[in-house]
Image (cartoon, rainbow, N blue to C red):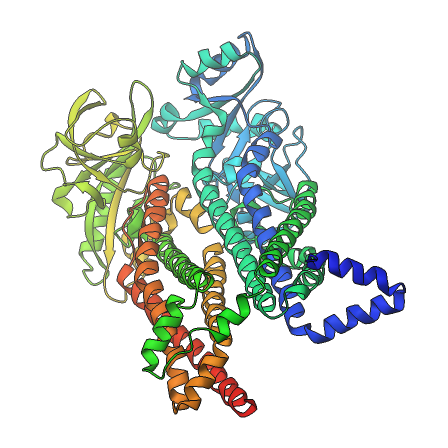
Amino acid sequence: MVVHPLVAAGMSVLQVGSTGAITMWVRSQIRRDWRALTLIALSVAIAGGFAMTAGIGARRAASTWDQFLTRTNMPDVAKEVLSSESGAALAELRSREGVTSAVRMSYMSVGLEGAEPTGAFVGRDPGFGTEIYRPVVVSGRAADPTRADEFTINPVMAESAGLRPGERVIIVSPDDVVHQPATMVGITVGAFDTGVNGGTQGMLLTPAFGAKWFAAYFAALPATTQAAYRDALLAQVAAPHTTAQLLGEQYVGGTDLAGDDVTAALGAEGTAYTVLAVVAALGTLIAIGQVVSRRVRRRAVQAPTLAAMGLAVGALLVPVVAYLASPLTGRGLVAQVDPNRAHVTDTLVMAGGTVAGFIVLVGVAVAAAWRAYARPGHESARTRANLMLPGPAGMFGGRVAAGWVGRSDRAAARAHVALSTLAVASVTATLVWSGAAGHAVATPARYGATWDAAVIPAADGPDDLDSVKIIDDAQARLTAHPGIGSVLGRGVAGMVETDSERIEVLQIDRAAGSWWPPLLAGRVPENPYEITVGSRVLDTGVRLGDQVVIGGGSFTVVGEHVASTWSNGDFGETVATTGNAVAQSDLDVPTAVMWVGLGHDASLEQLATIVGDAVEVRGATEVQPSQVTNLAGIGRLDELLLLVCVLLAFATLANGIVIATKPRQRDHATMRALGAAPSAVAGSVLWHTTIVTAIGGVVGVSLGVIAGAMAWRHTAHTALIGGALHRPGVVVFVVLTMLFAMGLLVAGAAGAGAVRRSRARLSIE
């Protein structure tokens, strides 16, 4: 009668009849196979812990943003209106049926005394900061909305200014219009700190501050600025039909104020976490499967015991490793959006993941043991059949790589090649994406800044001078010092009203220089009736060659560009046209701009000294758009993913070669007995490794480049930057070189082991 090994193990336990005997039996099992048990336990603990942590990160990346918007009371609808008309517009909005609350929010150019203005969002009406837009407190406390001498700042400003909750400072504005001693009571994070303003310093001022100072601040602004100054109306709406009606009246969804900029980066971070979890889980299954199957071939009856003991110990250690690896989920953009890292849901996910993973892995191990027990003649067929005649090492290694003995060997060989190819593809894809993303974040040209510095009129400069005249004077001073830099281009940037939105227009004076925003498609305009547009304009259905109406004029779209923003325009929603600095009255909030290329060894400080105090000099990296800032905030998860993929690739290749080599001990001994040199045995392992790595290299690198390119182009399109890869040839060379070195290392170690075992077996027989 054939008895299943699990049943046999149970019967043996029942027959023992004493705890001491059971303990002795367990100890004997551990002493006999402690290496395999240790490998199984560590594989489950380490890879399972990483998989669980990455799974938690993926869950948080997928859900945190929506939870964050809910917790911060983001408005349902929002709209920008002229500040001079905002009072009447607010009253009309509050009178609508279904509107539960509505407030005004303004942006004030203020900062700390003795430092450059950082800008601040200020509530104009009670309810801002509580009923609508209540940021998450990172440290300290929220400001009292009824006090004008309390405020909070975002983490970026806290790090750069070195402020701590409770410190007393003075808030000032240009020309010292606002001069308010105040206490920084807390560090907070809201949607306005992560979206359009992601990566920039910011302050949040109370409605009491706005009631006390905004009127005086507004009255001190130049007349042209007052005419274009805008407030944001924010409202919570209970009735769906009211929401639909407001959206039809050029309101926008409140979450759209920042959501689009953050969602793209969170999506990329969530994908990285998901891939990391899958790779770690795959690594766990590979390690467990290889260790268990190696023991199954030797002792099928012992396999369930071995697997159960190793998996039990490893499963107990998984939460420990997951806890040690938990800082991984606090290093990306997720942690910036949701600084509260402790979640009950994460604990439940960890507990559920441990139980589910344990059940799955035990099932895999038991299935492998069952299959091995059902085929008792499997081992003898592997080691004693098809004895080979002496032949070239390459032929022997090639036949081992192809799995010549039987169906099981062929399946194992194909699985090894497939897993190695998948591992190489994952390494290549990660390198392709990571290289392109790192280059995009670090290279201003990828987001429109092909110049070294931009010169614009200073915010606190003379009000009686035309901004174009200020730039003219600065240009004259610069051209008198050719060693400092050259004028690449100049123009006027401002906002233009359309039927449905406001877009930013760059009116570039081609006569003053050759600069034009980098083009992704099309060509540079050749006359004032042609324009290039940003990617978001094309997303609305506009195509190259179409006629569009902007500011009452008709233009032909001849190209797609990537350009930095200057006048509060959304990144990607820009239009660039030629012109000799057309009248500023045609633009809303116009700003004269001069783009400069620095000379050899010249610095921004030298340029600022030459052009004078009436202008402000900005380096190219100082105007990084929020999408790029958020992309950089992923937290180098791509490098962690690359490390895990490399380890998986090495483990897959090495374990596969070892598993295929060890059962060949009799064949190797036979070769030695027939006169083959030790180098022939080692050479067969080298040929085996070469075939596997060659297939994995050719197929895996090709698939990896395709997958990485597709992933990066999707990311770049979402971030509105150039989608070109960064040195893919270098990536291919690095991967192939690394694979070659890895193959030599594995073949050398496995070949030396095969020679040693063949010598020992030959002496025994």
Establish if 267 lies above or below 43.
Answer: above
Whether residue 200 is visible: no
Left or right placement of residue 124 versus residue 25 in this view: left
- Front-lying residue, 422 or 193: 422
Q: Residue at x 34, y 35 (%)?
A: 567
Point 14% across, 32% down: residue: 530
Quadrant containing the C terminus is bottom right
Q: In this view of the protein, which residue sits in the foreground, 327 or 730?
A: 730
The one nearer the camera, 257 or 111, is 257
Asked if 528 appears above or below 103 in the picture, the reply is below
Residue 621 visible here: yes
Q: Nearer the viewer, residue 416 or 734?
A: 416
Measured as percent of width and height from the top left, residue 359 is found at 66, 49
Relative vertical location of residue 53 with respect to residue 560 in this rendering, above or below = below
Q: How many marks?
A: 0
The image position of residue 515, as x and y in percent, is 19, 47
Q: Estimate the x, y position of residue 499 in percent, counting from the top left.
A: 30, 18
Q: Can you name the residue that lies furthest to the front here?
A: 1
Q: Quadrant of residue 313?
A: bottom right
Q: Is residue 573 left or right of residue 288?
A: left
Within the image, what quadrant is residue 352 found in? top right
Residue at horizontal 38 percent and vertical 75 percent from the top = 741
Q: State the residue lying farthest toward the left.
A: 526
The quarter of the rendered structure image containing the N terminus is bottom right
Provide residue 367's location: percent of width, then percent of height: 60, 54
- Residue name at image x 59 percent, y 34 percent: 67
